[in-house]
Image (cartoon, rainbow, N blue to C red):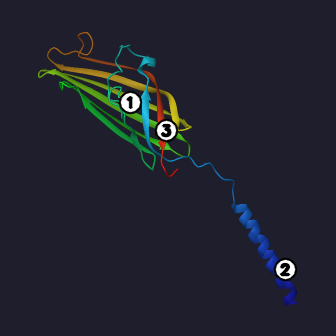
Amino acid sequence: MLKSTQPICVVMVLLLTTLACVSIQSPQEKVPPLYQSAILSVFPDNATFTGEEIPGALYDFCWPPRTGNSGSGFFEVYEDGVLDGQCTSKSSDETLQRKGNITGNYNPQTEEVSFRVETTNIFVPHPEGKVTLTIVFEGQGPVTNNTASGTGNFVYTCSAEGESVYCLGERTSLSTKGTMPFQMDFIESPES
């Protein structure tokens, strides 16, 4: 009787093993690309102010990784999705110093990015006066074909301290806000 049950047991074990293997396998999931760097472009010409409108207020800042409109440089996208980049520059006469940084996160599971840029210009035309201009810009959006685009929110502030320096007109401070389009282009890692 043993001889007749062994083939049945072996067949049953093979059948169960095959069924288990089939049920474990799943359709191949789309693997999002890994990125090593990216570049952020902002479009001040298309900004909409919801507060006081200040023509030209969003230009000449250090938008990471760019300085002015140089268009050069990239910020890092680390393996864990963290975005990190900085930029600095100054005028030739050293009366204007610019600095900016970007932080944020790229989520490969949802293929979305969120970021925050803080950029500041410090203008010191003479030892007794200083004007500080700051923009905080936040955005988010889906990443499709290595590009995210959308509209982010900005807050623009100005503070003037000292003699003979002003933000606009003869004001020593002002704040406004609005929205501005952006585009973030990602560069894939060689391992992708």
Q: Secondary structure at mark 3?
A: strand
In whole angstroms, how far apart are the C-alphas of marks 2 and 3?
56 Å
Q: Which residue is mark 3?
A: 113
Q: Which residue is mark 2?
A: 8
Q: Earlier in the sequence, mark 1 or mark 2?
A: 2
- Could you tell whether 10 is left or right of 172 in the image? right
Q: Which residue is mark 1?
A: 71
| Residue 91, visible in the rendered structure | yes
Give the label, 3 or 1, closer to the camera: 1
Characterize the local packing of mark 2: few (<14), some (14-19) or many (20 or more) Cα atoms within 10 angstroms.
few
Counting from the top left corner in percent of width and height, residue 113 is at: 49, 38
Q: Earlier in the sequence, mark 3 or mark 1?
A: 1
Please state which amino acid type lies under the numbered disc 3: Val
The residue that appears at 81% across and 80% down in the rendered structure is 9
The residue that appears at 76% across and 68% down in the rendered structure is 18
The residue that appears at 51% across and 28% down in the rendered structure is 150
Does residue 34 lie above or below 175 as drawn?
Answer: below
| Residue 49, visible in the rendered structure | no
Counting from the top left corner in percent of width and height, residue 83 is at: 41, 42
Counting from the top left corner in percent of width and height, residue 181 is at: 47, 24
Instruction: Point out which mark residue 9 bears.
Output: none
- Quarter residue 21 falls in: bottom right
Give the label, 1 or 2, closer to the camera: 1
User: Farthest top residue?
Assistant: 169
Q: Secondary structure at mark 2?
A: helix
Q: Are marks 1 and 2 in contact (CB under 8 Å)?
A: no
The residue that appears at 69% across and 56% down in the rendered structure is 26
